């Protein structure tokens, strides 16, 4: 039971954005995927979640090869992602954004809807209950009637996670959930992600905030220009000379040891 | 509480033929209802799902011709032709949807325009079946609703159209608040996100094109049966334009919008006949879109709500209660 990425390669014209990347995410674990800007993290997400096709390599979910399948089919296997550019249903309310996330867990048919059967009404009640729970979990309870467009930036980021979370992922892929948040919001997010950790699902986390990554990840995969630079526990990564070299030598904004 | 207003509106429409027995006014109401069906069908695609069709009239024409041919050739009743109208339009909707939606939304928009033109050319040239430019003429003495029950006179048509519109509105009302509505609107607002949580944009778009086309084809069927003359014009840009304008002016993705818009565009040509009506159509669209980009329905709802609030406040004051400013 795991999400396996095997020898994944992706070319954009002459540019090799990913070259032979392999790693795995198991339920109950948080895996960090880090690397400097342009290292290929989002490309990796896109290929794994069916938004673009790999040049070669495979993606396996719980023993099934799902390479190149469209994203909605992957979602049905429990592979759910968020987007680096925060992505919501802008004209829908906060409440409906989250309810949309329950689409694949609906318990009523189209006929139930059109004839307003009891099955449908009870299912909606159950849905609303779950939505309330998730809204509380992510501190959005007071905002449920507001159009997603009109939320603050931080709230939008949290709503995007709520939408992903309620769809009951088995593997949740988060692309820079803390980008643009202030330090306090970041540490709040960090602790709510840590508290979300359960045997139900695994998380693949792309994040530039090293403090967060080091704190909550069980395992870290480091990319550099599309290649695998290092793999290991946070402690191993912190002391890995190649990683330190890449981060410090490249003069990038983050430092592995930043606290 | 809100239900009262819906019931009141339904009651007014039900009693309308008794309030005015003028066949002229009743015929305007029938036309409004037919346009409303056309517009509701389009709104499912455009207002809820974000799929733009420039060839909605194709489905209108399919409905009109299937009913016309089966009535004229086989002397079928209207009810007997309806299943074939729905089957015909669904097949066309599935075909054009599956062929184009995968490639991208704009391809469907363009293909739909071409599709309507193809239907028009087939109607024009397949004379044995359609009588070409002369069109199909139905004998008003022989029109039957079902079995041997005749369908004659404005009042009968009025109720037929009214019931169909009410059923359509009821289903749209159910649909928009459910997981179906959320799936459609999520595709409209953000396709990648929708698919990332398991909603298939292609599947829902194809279904909604067929459903929207199906409603339009029933509108076309009634239209042909009511006027008794079906020419290739029914697949022309005119009816697509009416549907698009009705949805945009009335308010896309709203319950009252398509009906409101249909009323406006059914009545305007009567008030301002001839060449000028197209000009007026354009002017109405411009003015409404400039003043209220989401159409008239949201404005009316807001006015109504604030009016009711004021009214309630006055009432409370009269009863000597404190107004706590709701
Ligand atoms: N659709 C595309 N077409 C061409 N090149 C692309 C495309 N998407 C990404 N790239 C290139 O692939 C490389 C990896 O980009 P990617 O977005 O995966 O990086 P990233 O690790 O997510 O970076 P960041 O931290 O800035 O988000 C970059 O050089 C980028 O320019
Ligand atoms: Mg990225």
Image: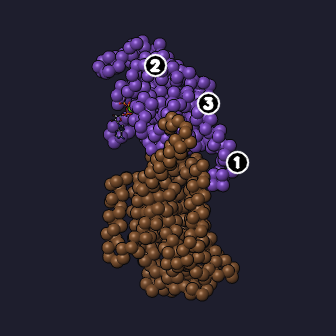
Q: The brown chain is which one?
A: B
Mark 2 or mark 3: name the one nearer the start of the chain: 3
Q: How many numbered callouts?
A: 3
Q: Which residue is drawn at 36% across and 58% down?
A: B288
Q: Are marks 1 and 3 in contact (CB under 8 Å)?
A: no
- Tell me, yes or no, if residue A25 can be seen here: no
Q: What element carries label 2?
A: helix
Mark 1 or mark 3: name the one nearer the start of the chain: 3
Residue labelled with disc 1: A118
Which of the two residues, B294 or A212, is positioned nearer the viewer here? B294
Label drawn at residue A1: 3
B151 above or below A146? below
Q: Residue at x 49, y 82 (%)?
A: B229
- Tell me, yes or no, if residue A104 can be seen here: yes
Label drawn at residue A194: none
Which of the two residues, B250 or B86, is positioned nearer the viewer here? B250
Image coordinates of residue B47 in percent, x first then y, are 46, 55
Whole-number angstrom distance, CA of label 1 to CA of label 3: 37 Å
Q: What element carries label 1?
A: helix
Q: The purple chain is which one?
A: A
Same subunit, labels 2 and 1: the answer reads yes
Q: Which residue is drawn at 61% across and 38% down?
A: A128
Subunit ID for the residue under disc 1: A
Whole-number angstrom distance, CA of label 2 to CA of label 1: 43 Å
A10 above or below B301? above
Label drawn at residue A187: 2
Subunit ID for the residue under disc 2: A
Subunit ID for the residue under disc 3: A
């Amino acid at each position: 039971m795991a999400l396996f990425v095997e020898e994944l390669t992706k070319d954009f014209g002459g540019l090799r954005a990913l070259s032979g990347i392999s790693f795995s995410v198991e339920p109950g674990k948080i895996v960090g995927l880090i690397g400097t800007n342009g290292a290929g993290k989002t490309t990796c997400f896109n290929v794994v979640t069916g938004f673009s096709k790999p040049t070669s390599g495979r993606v396996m979910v719980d023993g099934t090869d799902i390479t190149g399948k469209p994203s909605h089919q992957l979602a049905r296997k429990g592979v759910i992602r968020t987007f680096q550019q925060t992505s919501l249903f802008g004209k829908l309310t906060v409440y409906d954004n989250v309810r949309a996330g329950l689409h694949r867990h609906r318990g009523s048919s189209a006929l139930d809807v059109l004839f307003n059967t009891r099955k449908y009404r009870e299912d909606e009640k159950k849905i609303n209950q779950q939505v309330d729970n998730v809204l509380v979990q992510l501190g959005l309870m007071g905002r449920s009637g507001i159009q997603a467009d009109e939320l603050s930036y931080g709230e939008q980021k949290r709503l995007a996670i709520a939408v992903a979370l309620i769809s009951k992922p088995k593997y949740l892929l988060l692309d820079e959930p803390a980008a643009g948040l202030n330090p306090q919001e970041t540490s709040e997010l960090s602790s709510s992600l840590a508290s979300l950790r359960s045997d139900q699902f695994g998380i693949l986390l792309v994040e530039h905030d090293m403090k967060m990554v080091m704190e909550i990840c069980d395992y870290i995969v480091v990319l550099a220009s599309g290649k695998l630079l290092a793999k290991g526990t946070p402690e191993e990564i912190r002391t890995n000379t190649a990683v330190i070299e890449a981060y410090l030598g490249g003069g990038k904004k983050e430092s592995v040891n930043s606290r | 509480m809100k239900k009262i207003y819906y019931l009141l509106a339904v009651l007014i429409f039900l009693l309308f033929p008794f309030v005015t027995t003028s066949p002229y006014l009743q015929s305007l109401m029938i036309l409004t209802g037919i346009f409303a069906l056309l517009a509701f069908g389009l709104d499912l695609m455009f207002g809820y799902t974000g799929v733009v069709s420039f060839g909605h009239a194709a489905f209108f024409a399919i409905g009109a011709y299937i009913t016309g041919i089966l009535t004229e050739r086989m002397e079928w009743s209207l009810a007997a032709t309806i299943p074939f109208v729905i089957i015909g339009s669904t097949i066309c909707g599935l075909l054009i949807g599956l062929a184009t939606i995968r490639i991208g939304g704009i391809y469907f928009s363009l293909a739909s325009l071409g599709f309507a033109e193809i239907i028009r050319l087939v109607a024009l040239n397949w004379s044995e079946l359609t009588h070409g430019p002369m069109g199909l003429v139905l004998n008003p003495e022989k029109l039957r609703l079902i079995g041997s029950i005749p369908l004659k006179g404005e009042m009968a048509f009025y109720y037929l159209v009214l019931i169909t519109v009410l059923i359509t509105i009821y289903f749209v009302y159910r649909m928009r608040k459910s997981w179906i509505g959320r799936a459609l609107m999520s595709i409209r607002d953000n396709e990648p996100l929708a698919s990332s949580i398991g909603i298939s944009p292609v599947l829902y778009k194809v279904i909604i094109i067929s459903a929207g086309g199906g409603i339009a084809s029933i509108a076309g069927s009634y239209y042909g049966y009511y006027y008794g003359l079906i020419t290739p014009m029914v697949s022309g840009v005119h009816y697509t334009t009416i549907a698009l304008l009705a949805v945009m002016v009335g308010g896309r993705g709203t319950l009252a919008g398509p009906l409101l818009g249909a009323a406006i565009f059914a009545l305007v040509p009567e008030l301002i006949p001839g060449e000028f009506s197209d000009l007026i159509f354009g002017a109405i669209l411009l003015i409404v879109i400039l003043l209220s980009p989401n159409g008239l329905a949201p404005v009316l709802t807001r006015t109504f709500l604030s009016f009711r609030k004021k009214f309630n406040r006055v009432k409370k004051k009269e009863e000597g209660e404190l107004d706590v400013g709701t």
